[in-house]
Amino acid sequence: MQANQESVSAVQENAENGLTVSRNLIEYYVMEEVEQHFDQLPEATQDFVSKSDIVAYALNRLPAMYATTRRGYLRQTSEIKILFQEKIAEVVQQGLAAVQSDPFRFSKPLEKRNDVGADRALEQLRSVLGDRTITWENVAEIVHNRIQQYEANHSAWAPTANARAQFDWTPVALRDLTSVENSENV
C-alpha cells in the first residue's frame, strides 16, 4: 500500500532527524479507501464531491491510531488491518453518500500548512520589498512588476562597491576576449 510506505518513510525520516512526530495512521487507510471509491464515481460527480470532506467525515467516526516509532507503526497498522478495515470501508461509503447528498455546498477549504522555511522566505521577501500584501499566490507577479519598474527607471545597473570587490562583473564574453588578447600580447 502506497500510503503505508509514505507513512513509514515519514516516521523514519523524522526519527533520523531527531524529531518526535506522531502520525494518525488510520488517516492513510482512510485516504486510500477514499481514492478507491472516488475513482469509481462518474467524472461529473467527481467535479462536485470533495475528497477532503469524505476523509473528514470518515475520520470523525473512527478512532485515532497514532504512532511515533517504527515499532508503534507496525503494531498500529496490524491492528488497523485486523480490527478496522471493514469499518473504514463502511464509514467511507457513508461519507461519500453524505457528501453526495449535498454536493453544491460551497465553502472555503482550510489552507495547507506551509513549510516553515517557505514562510520565513516569504516574510523576508515582504520585508525586502516593503510589501505586506505579498502571498505565495501573487509573489511571481509582484516580483515581475518590481523588476520591470526598476528596469524602466534605471538604464544600467551599477553594482555597489562591495559587490565590485567580491565579483568580476565583466561580461563573460568580454572576459574571454580579454584573456585571448592578453595571451597574444605575451
Image (cartoon, rainbow, N blue to C red):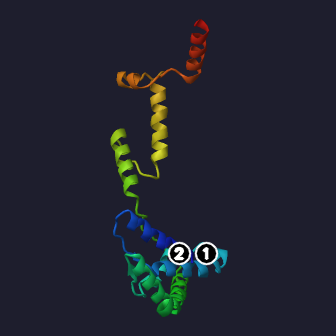
Sort mark 2 into few (<14), some (14-19) or many (20+) by Cα contacts within 10 Å: some
Taking depth in this image into account, of 124 and 164 the one nearest to the observer is 164
Residue 153, image x and y in percent?
Answer: 45, 25
x 49%, y 45%: residue: 140
Q: Residue at x 52, y 73 (%)?
A: 5
**Quick check: 72 left or right of 106?**
left
For the residues marked 1 and 2, what is the alpha-carbon distance in whole angstroms?
21 Å
- In the picture, measured across the screen, residue 131 lies left or right of residue 32, that is left
Q: Amino acid at mark 2?
A: Ala
Number of numbered discs overlaid on the protein picture: 2
Residue bearing mark 1: 46
- Which residue is found at the position 40% from the left and 48% from the top? 134
The quadrant of the image that shows the C terminus is top right
The answer to whether any part of residue 108 appears in the image is no
Is residue 167 at all visible to an observer of this figure?
Answer: yes
Judged from this view, the residue extending furthest toward the front is 186
**Residue 164 in the image: above or below residue 102:** above
Q: Nearer the viewer, mark 1 or mark 2?
A: 2
Q: Are circles 1 and 2 on residues that touch, CB within 8 Å?
A: no
* Residue underneath mark 2: 3
- Depth order, front residue of 83/102: 83
Instruction: Residue type at mark 1: give it.
Output: Gln
Instruction: Please state the horizontal and vertical placement of residue 24, each as a whole percent of the image.
Output: 41, 78
Percent x, y for residue 181? 59, 11
In the rendered view, tell whether residue 115 sits above or below residue 165. below
